[in-house]
Image (cartoon, rainbow, N blue to C red):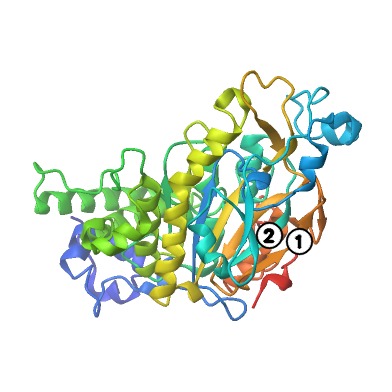
């Protein structure tokens, strides 16, 4: 180890200290201690930052249904479709409307399709919900339903990227990255942004990466496909002693610091050092956070015995511990909510997917409320787009609906939004958002506002211009707020 000039140690900042002493030596000085820490938290990129305005929410749990859930089979009740069922789509909708949906599909022979599930009104609010969500129906009075969403693409990969980054192409920061960049995190032993992923979907890692923001703000990814919720490479190998691990970390930190001095413009080097720091801290707390056996049987029963239910319970544990933004991906592998006729059919697709997620969602809302966390946690249910009011022309043996971005449904709960409230509407056939339309830019602006961030002020300079998640668009939907 290089000697340190004791006369100049008072000038050392956190990074110099890490480079000279090494991560292992910092650990020995009490890296995990609450009261005395070797590194000043004020210099950490994830140190909590003041919001622009008074926040209504502190954390976000973002539930993303991959594949394009049908608004017409979930939350947007359109009984008039029964009257028009069987009529050709070309007799009702213009060629521009049909051609603009998906260039890969031919709707010239498609016929209007009635909803395949029944709807009922629930709760004191009388919110319309499909029969496939019996558990969610019991908590609708905690929800703000948006039935007038619209976005700019009905291509899966593009729609998923849009809903996460605000842009049509990869390379831009995700919503979770923007939030942690703007606010930091309250738990210095855990990441600010965690993604619970059940596979890799069409949109790819762009949906949870930091784009041109420093790498510190991208998500820590937990793969949940196997049913085991664990971070890769976090546990110390049995053949490596604690002392050896400290020596390895010390060496890597020194080498990274030396490399950074020669390449000062490369921010990913700072992110690399941050990652080693964070990983060391996480070794002591993450295993406990991801151990669901620490929950009571009654709580685990509340969420249901499914992988998605376990994702939701894990998300609650994470936000309770101070993680700022948690995203749960459902159906990533194979875009499971993609309800084409040749992919299992609309009926079986949505009934199965709803059954796998319904109890977990309702359990999450109920659990957060019972713990006094719902008021400060914004729960978001989202998807990349909806489904067409008509079936596909070549449906083979099963009914399916095509991709549709002109109007669809998403919802919010907790975190400062109105309860038992339905906002906006599509037309009588569910084709276009006609009453109080909400774009993906408006959606992002509203989420940031609830967290105390002004979407016009939350910017990052890149390639000579200031970027923001809403680009030059977006307005906060004030009518959704309490």
Asked if one can make out residue 261 in the rendered structure from this viewpoint, the answer is: no
In the image, 42: left or right of 410?
left
Residues marked 2 and 1 touching at CB (< 8 Å): yes
Residue 215: % across, % down: 47, 51
Image-based side of 258 in relation to 461, left or right: left
In terms of sequence position, does the residue under pointer 2 or pointer 1 come before the other?
2
In the image, which disc is placed on residue 424?
A: 1
Position in image of residue 74 (x %, y %): 61, 49
Decide which of 159, 356 is in the foreground and name it. 356
Q: Residue at point 54% right, 70% down?
A: 414
Q: Residue at x 43, y 54 (%)?
A: 359
Give the labeled residue for mark 2.
146
Residue 71, given in percent of the width and then of the height, sits at 66, 47
Looking at the image, is 340 positioned above or below residue 439? Answer: above
Is residue 2 among the parts visible in the rendering? yes
Query: Depth check: 451 or 432 in front?
Result: 432
Q: Is residue 339 above or below residue 29?
A: above
- Taking the spot 54% from the left edge, 48% from the top edge, the residue there is 132
Residue 335: mark in rendering: none
Identify the element where label 2 is drawn: strand
């Amino acid at each position: 180890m290089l000697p340190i000039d004791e006369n100049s140690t008072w000038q050392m900042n956190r990074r110099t200290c890490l480079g000279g002493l090494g991560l292992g030596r910092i650990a020995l000085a009490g890296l995990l201690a609450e009261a005395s820490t070797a590194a000043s938290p004020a210099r950490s990129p994830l140190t909590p930052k003041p919001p622009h305005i008074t926040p209504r929410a502190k954390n976000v749990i973002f539930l993303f249904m991959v594949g394009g859930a049908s608004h017409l089979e979930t939350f947007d009740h359109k009984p008039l479709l029964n009257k028009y069922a069987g009529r050709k789509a070309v007799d009702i909708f213009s060629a521009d409307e049909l051609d603009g949906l998906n260039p890969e599909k031919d709707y010239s022979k498609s016929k209007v399709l009635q909803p395949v599930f029944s709807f009922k009104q629930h709760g004191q609010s009388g919110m319309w919900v499909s029969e496939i969500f019996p558990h969610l129906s019991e908590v609708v009075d905690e929800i703000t339903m948006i039935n007038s969403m619209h976005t700019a693409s009905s291509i899966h990969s593009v729609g998923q990227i849009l809903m996460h980054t605000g842009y049509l192409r990869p390379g831009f920061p995700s919503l979770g990255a923007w939030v942690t960049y703007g606010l930091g995190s309250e738990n210095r032993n855990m990441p600010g942004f965690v993604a619970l992923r059940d596979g890799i979907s069409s949109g790819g890692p762009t949906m949870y990466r930091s784009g041109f923001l420093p790498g510190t703000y991208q998500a820590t990814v937990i793969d949940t496909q196997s049913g085991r919720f664990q971070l890769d490479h976090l546990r110390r190998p049995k053949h490596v002693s604690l002392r050896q691990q400290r020596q390895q970390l010390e060496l890597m930190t020194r080498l990274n610091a030396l490399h950074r001095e020669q390449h000062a413009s490369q921010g990913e080097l700072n992110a690399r050092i941050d990652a080693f720091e964070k990983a060391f801290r996480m070794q002591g707390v993450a295993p406990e956070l991801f151990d669901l056996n620490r929950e009571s049987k009654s709580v685990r029963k509340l969420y249901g015995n499914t992988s998605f239910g376990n994702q939701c319970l894990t998300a609650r544990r994470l936000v309770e511990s101070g993680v700022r933004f948690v995203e749960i991906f459902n159906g990533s592998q194979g875009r499971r909510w993609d309800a084409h006729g040749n992919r299992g059919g609309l009926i079986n697709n949505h009934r199965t997917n709803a059954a796998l997620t319904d109890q977990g969602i309702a359990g999450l809302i109920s659990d957060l409320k019972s713990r006094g966390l719902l008021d400060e946690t914004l729960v978001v249910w989202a998807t990349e787009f909806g489904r067409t009011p008509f079936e596909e022309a070549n449906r083979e043996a099963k009914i399916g609906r095509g991709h549709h971005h002109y109007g669809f449904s998403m919802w919010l709960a907790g975190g400062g939004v109105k309860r038992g409230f339905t906002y906006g509407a599509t037309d009588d056939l569910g084709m276009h958002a006609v009453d109080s339309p909400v774009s993906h830019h408006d959606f992002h602006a509203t989420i940031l506002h609830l967290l105390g961030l002004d979407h016009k002020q939350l910017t990052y300079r890149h390639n000579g211009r200031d970027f923001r998640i809403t680009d030059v668009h977006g307005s906060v939907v004030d009518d959704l707020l309490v």
